[in-house]
Image (spheres, coloured by chain):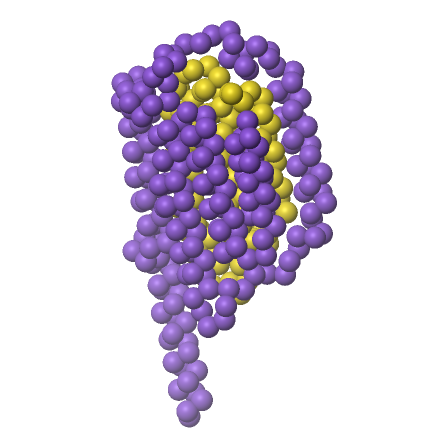
Chain colours: A purple, B yellow
Amino acid sequence: MITFWILAILLIASAVFVVTAKKPVYSVVGLLANFLALAATYLELQAEFLAVIQIVVYSGAILILFVFVIALLSSGVKPFEVGPDRAPRIAVPAVLFGALVLAGIAATVVGANTAALRGAAGVTGDANAFGSVADFGAALFTTNLLPFEVTALLLMVAVVGVVLIAGDEGPAGIVRRRKRRSLERESIVKRERAVR
Amino acid sequence: MIVAPENYVALSAVLFTIGVVGVIARRNPLIMLMSIELLFNAANLALVTYARAWVNNVGHIFAFLVITVAAAEAAIGLAIVAVTFRNLPHVDADDAAVLKG
C-alpha cells in the first residue's frame, strides 16, 4: 500500500513537471522519472515484461529520440529558442477542460458495473503463472500472433514514413533540396551584383 | 496487501488529465508530444490494472501494442516537428500556420 502511494505521488509530480517545465530538456528529465516510476508500478501490478519494455522502449529509445530532436532544433548559432509563452493565457481554460475530462472519466467509472470492474466475477487466467514473462510470451506468440505480426508491419511503415518526411531522398527532401539550391543561386547573383 | 484496482484507475485518470492539460496549454510541439506520451502511459496503466483484476494477460498484450504504436507515433511526430521547425525562427506550434486559410 505504501509503495502505491509513493509511486502515485512520484508519477503525478513528474507528470506535472513535464507539463509545466520551461524548457523541453527539463520536460525530458521529468518524463524519464515518470517512465521509471511507471515501470515500478507495472512490477507492482505483476506485469514483469511490460516493466522491462517500458524502460527499454520508452526511457531507452523514445526519450533519446526527443533529446536528439531538441539538439537538432537548437543546433544553430543561437540556443534553442522557444516562442513567446502563451501558456498563462490558455492555462485556465485548459485546466477547466482537464477537470471536465476527469469528471467524465469518473462518471463513467462510477456508473459502470463495479463488480465487473473489480474483476470479481470472471477470473479467467491461471493465477499462479499470471504476469510472468513465460505467460506473456506464450500468449503473444500463440493466441495473439497476428496482432504481433501486424506490429512489425506498423513499425516498418513508420520507419519508411520517417525517412520520406525527414530524409533528403524522399519527395519532400527533393523539394527542400531544390529550394535550397535556388536560394544559393539567388545569393550568388546578389553577391555578383554587389561586386559590380 | 493488494491495492484495490480503483486506486490505480484513479491514478490513471489523473495522469491522463495532466496529459490533456499539457497538450492544450503548451504551445511547444515537443512538450505537446511528451504530453501525448503521458496519455499513452495513462491508458496503459488502466489496461495493466484491469489485466491484474481479471487475472488475464490480454491486457498486457494490448498494452504492448499500445507501446509499439506510441513508438511509431513518436518517431513520425518528431520527424514532422524537426522538418517543420528547422526553418522557422521559434519552436512554437502556432507558427506552423502555412495551411491556415
A161 shown above or below B1: below
B19 shown above or below A104: below
Residue A58 falls in image quadrant? top left
Locate residue A69 relative to residue B93 in the image: left or right.
Answer: left
Q: Residue furthest top?
A: A121
Residue under the point 45% across and 89% down: A194
Question: Which residue is at the front of the view, A147 or A176?
Answer: A147
Residue under the point 46% across and 41% down: A35
Residue A138 visible in the picture? yes
Locate residue A35 relative to residue A161 in the image: left or right.
Answer: right
B56 shown above or below A68: above
Residue B62 visible in the picture? no
Q: Residue furthest bottom?
A: A196
Residue under the point 48% across and 51% down: A28
Question: Which residue is at the front of the view, A184 or B63?
Answer: B63
Question: Which residue is at the front of the view, B22 or B53?
Answer: B53
A131 shown above or below A5: above
Residue under the point 39% across and 51% down: A64
